[in-house]
Amino acid sequence: KFISVQSYEYIGVVLRCWFVVGVVSSISVTGYSGGGVIITCTYDRKYTDNTKYFCRGQKTFIQTEQCSDLIKTDKKNDNKWVNSGRFSLFDYTRATVFTVTFRDLSEQDSGTYQCAVDISLSEDSYTEVNLKVVTADCCEKSISLSAAAGGSVNISCRYPQSHSADVKFVCRRSGSDLCAEETSVKESRRWSAEGQMQLYDDREQQLLTGIISHVTQQHSAEYWCGVQSDQGHKSFITRVLIRVTGTDDLLTQINQNVIKNHS
């Protein structure tokens, strides 16, 4: 029995619909070998209490390829960090956003992932994430700096030309959070200051410069230079290890002597 051309067209439409069931959107993220990314995923407010998860693979109605869970939350993890290997997830329920931090990237991590919301008795809601991990020949993966207590630290990080128009940042890492403290700059050749950190972005030279003044032992930490896309996704390019030598007690004594000399 012959099937008409119109029937084939109808079947094709149905199949195409099956493949997009549950898809909210699709995003592209670029990561750099040795660095990390923070992926931002939004969801509908009615799913605030639902489990959120991040998996690798396709997620289709026919399930031709399994999406393997890498990290997930439960109801006890709302507004708390969840950690699993190289992944961390934080569900900001008030903002209906959850972020996924993916660390220690390699080119083998390139592929398709999903930010997903587990919905009982229905198809899960998910956002397809196309991650591309490349090696940035322009940029160092890691640098180490040192300074005496009370002095300044100068940070210089290059970035790929493709990110010239993006927001640049320097983040201080705390545990699994690559960006516990952030200072960013949005304009070219104009200083941006926050606290003891100043940033300057020269987009023509693709060079981000940072200065931390009056450093103390508390500034000894791991920092990251990176870029942020229009969608809010962060790519961490260069790790900066800062070590402050000397003691804060010595710095306090020097300051006291300066005050006495001027009194």
Image: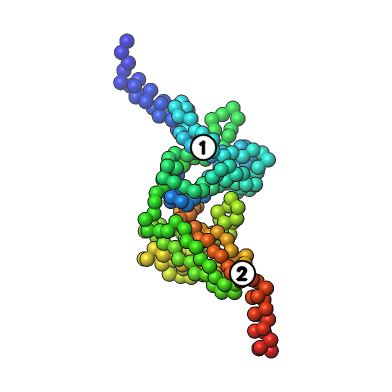
Question: Is the residue marked by circle 1 packed among few (<14), some (14-19), or many (20+) residues within 10 Å?
Answer: many
Image side of residue 201 versus residue 83, left or right: left
Q: Residue 77 location, x and y as percent?
A: 65, 42
Against 254, residue 49 (above or below) is above
Question: Is the residue marked by circle 2 packed among few (<14), some (14-19), or many (20+) residues within 10 Å?
Answer: many
Q: Residue 105 location, x and y as percent?
A: 47, 47
Does residue 29 appear in the picture of this structure?
no
Q: Dot 1: what SS?
A: strand
Residue in view at x 41 percent, y 67 percent: 202
Quickly name the residue at label 1. Answer: 55
Q: Residue furthest top?
A: 1
Against 4, residue 23 (above or below) is below
Against 60, residue 36 (above or below) is below
Quickly name the residue at label 2. Answer: 216
Question: Relative to the observer, which residue lies in front, 226 or 44?
Answer: 226
Label 1–label 2 contact, CB within 8 A: no
Question: Relative to the observer, which residue lies in front, 200 or 158?
Answer: 158
Q: Residue 260 location, x and y as percent?
A: 69, 86
Against 245, residue 223 (above or below) is above
Residue in view at x 54 percent, y 70 percent: 147
Image side of residue 249 versus residue 17, left or right: right
On the rendered image, what quadrant is the C terminus found in? bottom right
Q: Which amino acid, by three-letter code, is at mark 1?
A: Cys
